Image: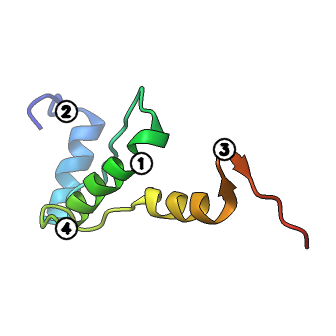
Amino acid sequence: MWFLPEDSHLAQFLNQREVLYPGAGSPGIIVFQNVNWSSSLDSFHDFSQKLSNSSAFEKIGIWSEDFNLFTKTKMKGDKIITECF
């Protein structure tokens, strides 16, 4: 990585990782800010599906699927439906 000093611990770790696990890639995360999730959840889900279908990624964790299921089954408007056990 061009931006890391070659003698840094991180650069040495990444170089050794590539030797031991060639082509394995690195875990990553995408962070969003200032998002209105109520109005953007469908767009986020579509974006996540496109990433998941891409051959550039091995595995994509799509938290919005679980969240969407929760909101459909546990929410009524902006209220959480309470259950009696």
Q: In this view, does 21 lie above or below 75?
A: below
Depth check, front residue: 53 or 25? 53
Look at the numbered disc 2 and give the secondary structure of its residue: loop
- Counting residues from the N terminus, which is met first, the one under dot 4 or under dot 3? 4
Q: In the image, what residue type sits under mark 2?
A: Asp
Q: Name the residue under label 3.
A: 78
Left or right of 6 on screen, residue 31: right
**Nearer the viewer's eye, disc 1 or disc 2?**
1
Q: Nearer the viewer, residue 59 or 40?
A: 40
- In front of the other: label 3 or label 2? 3
Tag 1 near tag 2, CB within 8 Å: no
Q: Mark 3: which secondary structure?
A: loop
**Quadrant location, the C terminus:** bottom right
Residue tagged 4: 53
- The mark total stands at 4
Q: In which quarter of the image is residue 71?
A: bottom right
Q: Distance between the residues labelled 3 and 2?
A: 53 Å
**Three-letter amino acid code at the position of disc 4:** Asn
User: Which residue occupies the extreme right position in the image?
Assistant: 85
Q: Which of marks 1 and 2 is nearer the N terminus?
A: 2
Q: Which of marks 3 and 2 is nearer the N terminus?
A: 2
* Residue in front for this viewpoint, 26 or 61: 61
Q: Residues within 10 Å of mark 2 (few under 14, many from 20)?
A: few
Label 4 element class: helix
Measure how far apart labels 4 and 2 are at the Cα level. Answer: 37 Å
Q: How crowded is mark 4: few (under 14 residues within 10 Å), some or many (20 or more)?
A: few
| Real-space CA distance between mark 1 and mark 2, rounded to the nearest whole angstrom | 43 Å
Q: Mark 1 points at which residue?
A: 41
